[in-house]
Image (cartoon, rainbow, N blue to C red):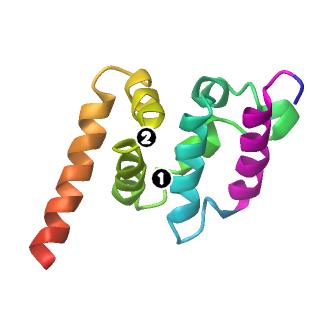
Amino acid sequence: MSSFDFEAADTITMLRTLKPRLAGKNSDPRICFVIAVLKAGLYTNIIRHDLLDRYALSGRDFDTCFEMGDRSAVVHGVVKRALVDDVVKQAICDMGAGNWEAWKKTFDDAESIQSDLF
């Protein structure tokens, strides 16, 4: 882990711990995984598979977070964090043009559904 600062190294350790739980029914590990990747600035490293050989982490793991049938719940959890954490919000924006707007719409839609239930 010498090529990463201590915070990124700690994040990589946490991501490796979360990885076996990404395919489970609970969305919390997926939300935590995405937030950790974004917060630590590891998104590009993950999607380029830079961490695959040494740490067994790749874009496939990041994608899994959104492919378990609860994508909206994952996006909602990540955006909820981004609304109070500018680093996470900026990382979402940096993922691509229109990404923040799309994720925020998913968040708003989920919030609307929840408010309609109560």
Image spot of residue 73 (x, y percent)? 37, 60
Q: Residues within 10 Å of mark 1 (few under 14, many from 20)?
A: few
User: Along the polypeptide, which appears first: circle 2 or circle 1?
Assistant: 1
Q: Nearer the viewer, residue 112 or 39?
A: 39
Query: Residue 59 is drawn in which quadrant?
Result: top right
What separation in Å lies between label 2 and label 1 (alpha carbons)? 25 Å
Q: Which residue was labeled with disc 1?
A: 67
Magenta-drawn segment: 3-20
Q: Does residue 77 appear to the left or right of 58 in the view shown? A: left
Circle 2 residue: 85
Badge 2 vs badge 1, beta-carbon distance below 8 Å: no
Residue type marked 1: Glu
- Where residue 58 appears, as percent x and y from the top left, is 68, 36
Residue sitting nearer the eye, 90 or 27:
90
Kindly identify the residue that appears in the image at 27 percent across and 25 percent down: 98
Residue 104 image position (x, y, % from top left)? 26, 42
Q: Residue at x 65, y 23 (%)?
A: 48
Residue drawn 36% across the image and 51% down it: 80
> 98 or 1: which is nearer to us?
1
Residue in view at x 32 percent, y 20 percent: 97
- The residue sitting at the bottom extreme is 118
Q: Amino acid at mark 2?
A: Asp
At mark 1, the secondary structure is loop
Q: What secondary structure prevails in the magenta region?
A: helix
Q: Is residue 99 magenta?
A: no
In the shown orientation, is residue 7 left or right of residue 92?
Answer: right
